[in-house]
Image (tube, rainbow, N blue to C red):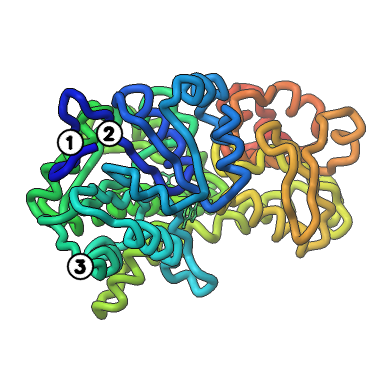
Amino acid sequence: MMNSHPLPSDNDVMTFGIIGLGYVGLPLCVEAAENGALKVIGFDVNEQVVESVNSGCSHIQDLTDYQVRSLRNRGLIEATCDMSRLAECDAISICVPTPLSKTRDPDVSYISAASDAVAATLRPSQLIVLESTTYPGTTREVLKPKLESTGLVVGEDFYLCFSPERVDPGNKTWTTKNTPKVIGGLTKACGDIGQSFYEQFIDKLVRVSSVEAAELTKILENTFRAVNIGLVNEIALIADRLGVDVWETIDAAATKPFGFMKFLPGPGLGGHCIPVDPHYLSWKMRTLNYKTRFIDLASEVNSEMPMFVVDKVREVLSQHRVSMNGSGILLLGIAYKSDVDDIRESPALDVMQLLQEDGADVRYHDPYVPKLPWKGAELSSEELTDTVFSWADCVVILTDHSCFNYEEIIDRAKAVVDARHAAFGAGVAIADGDSWIAKS
Ligand SMILES: NC(=O)c1ccc[n+]([C@@H]2O[C@H](COP(=O)([O-])OP(=O)(O)OC[C@H]3O[C@@H](n4cnc5c(N)ncnc54)[C@H](O)[C@@H]3O)[C@@H](O)[C@H]2O)c1
C-alpha cells in the first residue's frame, strides 16, 4: 500500500477498486487483474452480480466463466457490496450507469451515490477516476465538491481524473486493453498519476489537458455515430421515396478511397450509449442557452425509423390482403445489435410496441435473448418451427445475428421485411424492387 503516491513500487501490489460490475466494469476488472499485476476488488449494489463474480461466473457475454474463475482462484479478483472496503483501494474507477430520466435529462444519481461512497472512505493518496459517460463538467461539478467535503484537497491529497470507457461489446478485435484510452486530470498531478496507473494494463493512453476535454471527447465519439446514422437513415427515407436501393448507393459511395465513411441505415438507434449520450450534451448546452441542432435533428430522424419499418410491414401485409390488426408478426432479433444479448434502448422494442398498438400479435426469436420482460410479463424466444413460420404473416429481420440462416428464413417465411439488409447481404432475398422487403 502506498503512502503518498498511488503508483506501485517494486514491493507493492496495488489494490484497484471498480464500482459497477456491468458491461464496462467487469471487463475492466479482468483486464486489470490479468495484465496489471493488481489486486482487484469489484463493488456493486446488486448482490446477485457480486455472488456471480465471487462464484467464478461471468454475467457479461464478452467474458468467459473461465476468465473470471481463474482470476478468482488466483486471488486476484473479488466482488463485494461492502462499500466501506473502498478504503482498501489505492485507485478507484467509477463505472456506474448514466441513463436518461423520464424527461430525457441526465440521471447522474448513480454517479452521485458512487461518489458519496468514495467520499465516505476517502484517504490521502487515492486515485479516483470517473469512467461513466457523462456531460462535460460532471467530474468538476459533482465529484470534486463531494470528495473535497472530506477536507482533503484534489491534486494534493488525492487525485481525480475522467477517463471514458470505449468498450464495444461483441467486438473481438478492439478490447479494453488495445483500445487507446483518453484521460484528463483535474490538475496536472492528477493526470500524470492517472495516466501512469492505466499504463500498467492498457496499451496506449491519450492524455488531454482537462477533465472537460476528456468528457467531451467521449460525447463527441458517440454524437458522431448518432449524427452519421441519422444522416444515412434520412438518405434511406429519401432513397425509398425515389425508389432507389439505399444500400447499393452506400456501397457505391464507400468505394471512394477518401473522404467517405460508411454508416448503415436500420430500424433505429439502440444500446446504452449512442441513443443516450448525445442528450447529456444537449442538456448541458441548454443550461448555457445553446441548442444542439445536429443532435436534435439526428435524434428526430433516428426515432422515425421504427415507424418506417412498421409501414413496410403494413405494405407487405396488404400485398397479401392481410390486415395489420390481427396479423401474426415474428420479429427476428431483439438485441440492439448483432451477436450481443443487450436489449437496452433496442429499436426492436419500439417496433414491437408500434405493431402491438396496431393490433398485431407479435412474437420474437432471438437466441441471445431467451426471455424478454415486457409490460409486466415475460415473453420467451420462439423456436423457429414450421408452426411458427406458418403462424407468422410476416417475419421482420431487426437484428442481423450472424447465427441466423437467412436462406432458410426466406424459404420458410410467407413474407420478410429486412430492416438490416441481411438477407440481401446473404444473397438470398427474393427482391421485388424494394430494398427493405426481402420476400413479398
Ligand atoms: N455498455 C457499453 O457498451 C458502454 C461503453 C462505453 C461506456 N459506457 C458507459 O459506462 C457506464 C456503465 O455502463 P454499463 O453498460 O457497464 O452499465 P451496466 O448497467 O451494465 O452496469 C452498471 C453496474 O453498476 C452497478 N451500480 C449501480 N449503481 C451503483 C452504485 N452506486 N454502487 C455500485 N454499483 C452500482 C449496477 O448494479 C450494475 O451492475 C455508463 O456511463 C455507460 O454509458 C458503456
What element does badge 2 sit on? loop
Q: Is residue 77 left or right of residue 156?
A: right
List the residue tagged with mark 2.
Answer: 14
Q: Quadrant of residue 123?
A: bottom left
Which mark is drawn over residue 7?
1
What's under tag 3, amino acid-wise?
Gly
What's under tag 2, amino acid-wise?
Met
Cα gap from disc 3 to disc 1, whole angstroms: 23 Å
List the residue tagged with mark 3.
Answer: 151
Q: Is residue 285 visible?
A: yes
What residue is rendered at 27% in x and 29% in y?
A: 13
Question: How many discs appear?
Answer: 3
What's under tag 1, amino acid-wise?
Leu
State the residue lying farthest toward the left: 188
Cα gap from disc 2 to disc 1, whole angstroms: 8 Å
Cα gap from disc 2 to disc 3, whole angstroms: 24 Å
Place of residue 307 in the rendered image (x, y in percent of width and height, measured from the top left): 62, 58
Place of residue 156 in the rendered image (x, y in percent of width and height, measured from the top left): 10, 56
On the rendered image, what quadrant is the C terminus found in? top right
12, 298: nearer the viewer: 12
What residue is rendered at 68% in x and 38% in y?
A: 369
Mark 3 vs 1: CB contact within 8 A: no
Q: Is residue 337 left or right of residue 90?
A: right
Q: Is residue 317 above or below residue 196?
A: below
Q: Is residue 3 left or right of residue 339?
A: left
What element does badge 3 sit on? loop
Q: Quadrant of residue 260?
A: top left
Q: Is disc 3 surrounded by few (<14), some (14 to 19) or many (20+) residues within 10 Å?
A: few
